Image (cartoon, coloured by chain):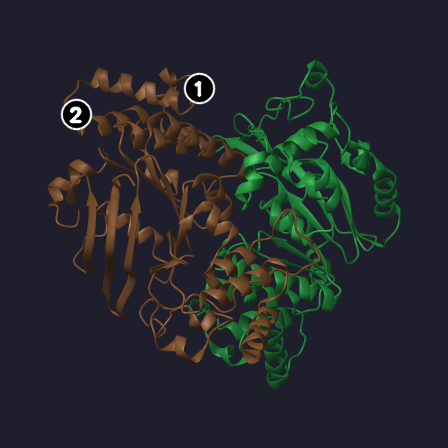
Amino acid sequence: MSDRLSGTAATDESRAAAHAGGGETLYEIRDLKKHFPLTSGMIFRKQVGAVHAVDGVSFDVKRGETLGLVGESGCGKSTTGRLLLRLLDPTSGSIKFEGEEIADIKPKQLIEFRRDAQMIFQDPYSSLNPRKTVGSIIGEPFSIHGMKTGEGERRKAVQELMDTVGLNPEHFNRYPHEFSGGQRQRIGVARAVALKPKLIIADEPVSALDVSIQAQVLNLLRELQRDLGLTLVFIAHDLSVVRHMCDRVAVMYLGKIVEMAGSDQLYGHPRHPYTGALMSAVPIADPKLAAVKKRQILAGDVPSPTNPPPACRFHTRCWKAQDICHQDEPMLEAKDGGNIAACHFPMTDAEVLERVPTSRHV
Amino acid sequence: MTEPLLSVRDLHVHFATDDGVVKAVDGVSYDIGPGRTLGIVGESGSGKSVSSLTVMGLTRSKISRISGEIHFGGKDLLQASDDEMRHIRGEEIAMIFQDPLSSLHPFYRIGDQLVEAVQAHHKVSKAAALDKAVELLRLVGIPQPKDRVGGYPHEFSGGMRQRVMIAMALINEPKLLIADEPTTALDVTVQAQILELMIRLKAELNTSIVFITHDLGVVAEMADDIAVMYAGRIVEFGTKETIFENPQHPYTWGLLGSIPKLDANRDEPLIPVSGRPPSLINLPSGCSFHPRCPYVREAHKKVEPTLEPVNGDNEHHVACLLDAGVRGRIWDDLREGKRPEEARADVMAGEGAA
């Protein structure tokens, strides 16, 4: 088994090099930080601390790929998604979209930028204005950007969009409450693709949906990505959904990226113990497989991002932690098999095989 | 076979609303043996929660019409008075809800809430009840239970609150525990902790569990038997192994095809169940799954299927009008990775030849 893993190491490394060097970079994120201030005092507000929601993340997104961001709640994945679109202003760091810095551009230029980058939100109930018809919700991007101004022209465009995402175009004049959860998410998707953006950030797009509906929406996203040549940043906590959707995955913990690799590499041989624990925790819909694997259960909860642990942030819950982990912060670097991970003691192939159910199938 | 602990027979729960009668549960029957775990799976609106709430007597209201029988401990719970139900609830049958934040009272200390649960059923001193509370908090893995017992719910994390809920449910050592989506609101890592805790406690206390979830992965880890519900009815019932290895209902196939598997080829699209769940006010005629079923035949729109044993196997029941042989051939095709249309075409071709 370990032969098999090391045997593929060479090709994996070249693949890692390929996605480090080859392929056109659409998005370049460097040392991005977002600290939310904590204040006290009623009249004279003074800052007493900060929530380190995102604390120095760097990654590239290639044109046409799907990059997944995963982690537990509070790890900063949604904040990162919002920073990428400047729905939140970063504390520091650089966000380059097609080579242009957008971390500090003015609102006017932001509108231009958002023609190319759109978002799909998690909750299809609260992200659609209940007092607007579906037609005007999907048509709103056009009015913001002054496109398709003719009445008939806009209506036609909206109905085409509705057809694309699998909604009945005749329901143009209905209100969001007349649609089911899955259909509402389709409305959100139609609104996001209306301007033919280059990039879509999908923040937990299927978490609120039933499984059968979830599969319909995931298939839709994949079809649209193929047909429109979209780049997707896919934020989710469901690891099986992320594996299904993403080419590359970044795992976040307490505001930092702890591991990043191609999907097959990451699920086949996670190196960071946190990634391993996440994968080990996923319930498997297969009683036979569930019976043979050894579950790695993480003790405790995620520490507070107000006061994250020093050095390696995972050391308080890590089963491999040693003294150095409390003192030296590990850097993101290439590990065995081509994964990029920030860990002093990455998981060995034997440990991976014992704990990670997916390792047997890659 | 041993005497079942809980036996539900032909349960109907209808709600009269302004829009019409909502048939939330429409003829459900099942048994749970002592120490067994029954997993109930289905989508939202399939009646999985309502059927369990009814067991607890929590759906009684002016607008609800409940019929059928629920046998538990020699009594029919549907005939029990509200007073009798109050004794059974929390003492013999306990429940864990999905959202631990809204199920705990924010103004009261954890300890007081646990003490209340004990004193509602037993004449014991507050000090004795508090000792019991600390013991239970230790059992469910809360560190420093002596100190934490004085804390308020907001001082606990989501996973810790769910542990408190489990402690509260188990404090009177109930014979039956109903867990309604107990881990849905939690992160996978915390979910794994809670599931492991429930497996351990079940082994220690020999409690029977009804585990309601929409997550097939969770049910694969927790349940002994599985009931698949659709539109207020059980459409398939069997042991966990049967349901995953030899499922017989097209809806069960649909559910299994909808979830991305960690070991599947990533380039293959998922196979969702087409359409969406029906309105419970206006159920489709005949088999209520027929509008979404890829293998539907004309006759299925008129006849209602009943739960029948599969090939005479009394442990495995399915409510499907398709012929058992046809179902077997379709499942073989699906397992080979064929799409539903292809499986349907194969079966049709087979019948044409015959």
Q: Are marks 2 and 1 on the same chain?
A: yes
In the picture, residue A34 is in which quadrant?
Answer: top right
| Image height of B215 relative to A41, above or below | below
Precedes in sequence: disc 2 or disc 1: 2
**Residue behind mark 1:** B143
Amino acid under disc 1:
Pro
* Residue A136 makes an appearance in the image: yes
**Colour assignment, chain A:** green
Residue at 11%, 45% (x, y): give it.
Answer: B81
**Residue behind mark 2:** B122
Given residues B266 and A50, the one toward you in this image is B266
| Image height of B320 relative to B182, above or below | below
Q: Disc 2, disc 1: CB below 8 Å?
A: no
Which secondary structure, mark 1? loop
* Residue A91 makes an appearance in the image: no
Residue A226: image location, x then y, percent: 73, 65
Q: Residues within 10 Å of mark 1 (few under 14, many from 20)?
A: few
Q: Nearer the viewer, mark 2 or mark 1?
A: 2
Residue B110: image location, x then y, percent: 32, 27
Furthest-front residue in view?
A: B354
Given residues A239 and B156, the one toward you in this image is A239
Screen quadrant of the C terminus of chain B? bottom right
Taking B279 as reference, is B172 left or right? left
**Colour assignment, chain B:** brown
Residue B204: image location, x then y, percent: 37, 25
Residue B281: image location, x then y, percent: 31, 69
